[in-house]
């Protein structure tokens, strides 16, 4: 199909570029994965550097995924494809994704979740959320991560706790009339390179999950391990 | 690193980009999946799928020139070459995935994966698909073309549901789909209603709305689809169904508007463009119909939905828009594209003969009309009533009323109680100055059909069921599309089985006639009632018969 670039909105141009960049990222990360396979996991400096490349590569990818999702959601074209999922399997799959990064940094992690817990959500969307929070937690935790999943008041609550220093105040949920709100884009803090975009994305994903008149939401508190950060997403 | 869950699996990778194909292959091989085939375009993929079994297929959405990923899946399913047990995964961007979900296409892949595809994700997704396919394996056998048996599929489904554990939503949806396929729309709508109360997913909404539609509960169906749109106005499929509801209610204008909305949201569906073409043509909105049929042709180029009806639709629209030369070009293209398809050539010849009448070239028109007639006589029962009338009208304009009479007699036999159709027949004769002859023909033909039918019904009422069945089976041969005759044939068969017990032969025969009615008029109320009777009959009576 021919596209007249002059007529495109800038956001559309970015969107189609991202599509192409993602092809490159697939090649890059895929090739990297086979290089890592061939490399002895000996903690050598080279190996460390490769892991660093992989970590940053995944961050770039997550950022692009979020950008695309937010671009589509603004147009009402980001739609959940809800299916039933085993929550424990889902969480362990996505933690496995980060296994190398976690063990390399000496981060202990555990999943507290009934192995038979089934819930309804779009697993691709949730994967974006999980990847994002795990990536962040890896960056900010001291040495522990804990996933926790249970059903509370007919919502699935997925929470990730760390034992770092906790969220800065401007990223914490606000509390109004007994409810916690985190669905506004936070102010961008260029100094810490923390845009809050990841949280905004998570809030969008949560909100898109609707059932019987109720929508999902997220909260961020400092009630994690030893006052560390705690991110929770609630899905009806 | 790898748990080896892909060990021994056969895989097919479809991607137009060699680098990506090879990387995926390396990735799969590192997961101990050794048997990996590669295809670089849709046609190559289709021929591989046709001659090999694969446990899973990874197909990129964008395959460059030719078919795209979903079109490969569509064609494989359409041609019934994809076993139920094969997992078909489409690699698609978020945007494409959303488009497919919003369109809720008939042929959804088993799963989507997004780039970048990592090994862990691939392994876990495929592992889950294999588990799911294994769980549904028995049901899958009964859904597959060669061994299709929906009744057995339903029993297998019920067994699986009774096997304990929390019922999976997927299995429940599958059960509803089977009820729907069995033509038990009442059972299906009740089933999906319950699921809808549990989870308002678009898939459940679609199935619920569809079942209600065929049950003729149009207002309720409308409410369901409106609810879907209330959640997200981009769900094109909901507009499609609202359009169908309006059409059924006789509101063609509104139906067209709804389809135009759906097209705006999701233009690439061939059936949707065709639907708009047909309805706007009926509304005499020929500019819209011209555009829609043209789009249907363009989007259909690589699709299994490619059909000659879009060409005839376009040609007729062009003719109405005073472009007979362009219309003729379309007909020529049709003849070349579908050279080996009689049905297509038949329709092409009809349109051609009518175009030449408009262009006042009687000789060329007669030549085309005779070609059409020759094709008609090869398979007279394949023609629809509208086609027969259309050709008859051409013959009448050319002063060949005997040919027109033959065509119309056959058509009236099939639709003797369709008032609108009979009026149309009378009109074309009146236009040719033969009002009296036309009227007499309709009267006479319809009378013969009615007398035959009444005789068959009387015999059945007198308890002479064998004679009634013999009479109907003979009658249906000369009017295979007559709904009443088909229904009454099935009815006599059912009465016989209720009296003397069911035999497999008679069960199949009754189902054959009822299926035929469903293919002509899926919402036929009497058909549904007889189908319900037939279902009651099958298992119990057969058992009795076996025990005797």
Image: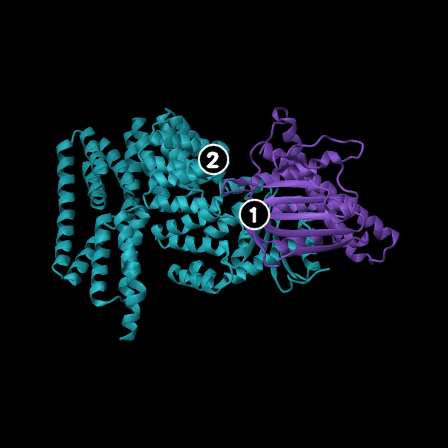
Chain colours: A purple, B cyan
Q: Quadrant of residue A136?
A: top right
Q: How many neighbours does mark 2 have within 10 angstroms: few (below 14), some (14-19), or many (20 or more)?
A: few
Query: Between residues A229 and B534, which one lies in front from this camera angle?
Result: A229
Q: How many neighbours does mark 1 have within 10 angstroms: few (below 14), some (14-19), or many (20 or more)?
A: few
Q: Position of residue A60 (x, y in %)?
A: 73, 41
Chain identifier of the residue bearing label 2 in the image: B
Q: Of all residues shown, which one is farthest toward the front? A: A177
Identify which residue is drawn at 32% across, 49% down: B519
> Disc number at residue B230?
2
Mark 1 falls on what kind of element? Answer: loop
Query: Between residues B291 and B418, which one lies in front from this camera angle?
Result: B418
Q: Of all residues shown, which one is farthest toward the bottom? A: B548
What quarter of the picture does the N terminus of chain A occupy? top right
Query: Between residues B300 and B60, which one lies in front from this camera angle?
Result: B60
Question: Disc 1 designates what residue?
Answer: A153
Task: Give the side of residue B146 with respect to residue A70, left or right.
Answer: left
Identify which residue is drawn at 48% across, 44% down: B200
Task: Say if B412 sits above or below B166 in the image.
Answer: above
Identify which residue is drawn at 37% across, 47% down: B211
């Amino acid at each position: 199909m021919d596209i007249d670039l002059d007529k495109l909105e800038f956001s559309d141009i970015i969107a189609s570029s991202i599509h192409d960049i993602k092809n490159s990222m697939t090649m890059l990360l895929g090739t990297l994965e086979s290089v890592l396979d061939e490399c002895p996991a000996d903690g050598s400096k080279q190996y460390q550097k490769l892991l660093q490349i992989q970590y940053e590569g995944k961050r770039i990818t997550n950022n692009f995924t979020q950008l695309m999702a937010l671009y589509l959601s603004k147009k009402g074209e980001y739609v959940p494809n809800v299916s039933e999922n085993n929550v424990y399997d889902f969480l362990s799959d996505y933690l496995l994704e980060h296994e190398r990064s976690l063990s390399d940094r000496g981060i202990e992690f555990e999943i507290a979740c009934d192995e038979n817990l089934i819930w309804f959500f779009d697993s691709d969307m949730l994967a974006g959320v999980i990847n994002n929070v795990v990536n962040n937690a890896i960056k900010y935790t001291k040495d522990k991560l804990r996933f926790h999943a249970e059903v509370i008041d007919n919502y699935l609550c997925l929470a990730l706790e760390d034992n770092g220093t906790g969220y800065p105040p401007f990223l914490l949920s606000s509390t109004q009339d007994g409810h916690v709100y985190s669905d506004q884009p936070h102010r961008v803090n260029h100094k810490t390179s923390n845009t809050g975009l990841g949280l905004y994305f998570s809030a969008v994903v949560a909100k898109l999950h609707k059932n019987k008149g109720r929508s999902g939401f997220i909260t961020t508190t400092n009630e994690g391990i030893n006052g560390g950060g705690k991110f929770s997403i609630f899905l009806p | 690193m790898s748990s080896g869950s892909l060990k021994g699996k056969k895989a097919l990778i479809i991607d137009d980009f060699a680098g990506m194909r090879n990387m995926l292959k390396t990735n799969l091989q590192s997961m101990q999946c050794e048997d990996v085939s590669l295809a670089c375009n849709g046609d190559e993929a289709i021929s591989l799928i046709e001659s090999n079994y694969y446990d899973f297929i990874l197909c990129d959405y964008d395959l460059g020139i030719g078919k795209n990923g979903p079109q490969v899946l569509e064609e494989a399913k359409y041609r019934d070459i994809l076993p139920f047990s094969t997992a078909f995964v489409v690699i698609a961007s978020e945007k494409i995935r959303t488009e497919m979900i919003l369109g809720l296409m008939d042929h959804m892949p088993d799963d989507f994966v997004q780039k970048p595809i990592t090994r862990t994700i691939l392994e876990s997704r495929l592992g889950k698909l294999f588990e799911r396919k294994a769980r549904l394996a028995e049901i899958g056998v009964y859904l597959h073309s060669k061994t299709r048996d929906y009744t057995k599929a339903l029993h297998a489904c019920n067994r699986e549901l009774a096997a304990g554990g929390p019922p999976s939503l997927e299995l429940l949806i599958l059960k509803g789909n089977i009820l729907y396929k069995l033509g038990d729309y009442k059972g299906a709508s009740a089933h999906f209603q319950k699921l809808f109360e549990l989870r308002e997913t678009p898939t459940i909404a679609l199935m619920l709305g569809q079942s209600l539609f065929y049950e003729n509960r149009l207002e309720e169906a409308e409410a369901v689809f409106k609810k879907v749109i209330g959640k997200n106005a981009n769900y094109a499929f909901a507009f499609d169904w609202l359009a169908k509801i309006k059409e059924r209610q006789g509101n063609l204008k509104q139906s067209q508007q709804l389809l135009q909305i759906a097209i705006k949201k999701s233009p690439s569906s061939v059936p949707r463009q065709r639907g708009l073409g047909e309805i706007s043509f009926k509304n005499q909105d020929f500019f819209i119909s011209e555009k829609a049929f043209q789009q249907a042709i363009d989007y259909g180029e690589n699709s299994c939905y490619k059909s000659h009806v879009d060409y005839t639709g376009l040609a007729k629209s062009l003719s109405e828009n005073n472009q007979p030369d362009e219309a003729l070009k379309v007909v020529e293209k049709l003849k070349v594209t579908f050279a080996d398809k009689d049905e297509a050539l038949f329709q092409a010849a009809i349109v051609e003969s009518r175009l030449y009448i408009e262009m006042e070239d009687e000789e060329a028109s007669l030549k085309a009309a005779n070609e059409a007639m020759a094709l008609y006589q090869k398979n007279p029962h394949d023609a629809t009533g509208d086609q027969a009338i259309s050709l008859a009208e051409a013959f009448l304009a050319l002063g060949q009323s005997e040919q027109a009479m033959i065509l119309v007699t056959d058509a009236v036999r099939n639709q003797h109680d369709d008032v609108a159709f009979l009026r149309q027949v009378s009109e074309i004769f009146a236009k040719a100055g033969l009002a009296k002859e036309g009227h007499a023909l309709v009267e006479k033909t319809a009378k013969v059909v009615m007398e035959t039918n009444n005789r068959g019904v009387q015999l059945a009422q007198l308890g002479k069921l064998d004679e009634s069945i013999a009479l109907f089976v003979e009658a249906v041969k000369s009017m295979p599309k007559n709904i009443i005759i088909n229904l009454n044939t099935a009815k006599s068969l059912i009465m016989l089985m209720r009296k003397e017990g069911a035999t497999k032969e008679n069960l199949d025969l009754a189902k054959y006639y009822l299926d035929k009615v469903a293919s002509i008029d899926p919402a036929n109320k009497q058909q549904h009632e007889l189908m319900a009777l037939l279902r009651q009959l099958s298992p119990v009576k057969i058992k009795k018969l076996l025990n005797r």
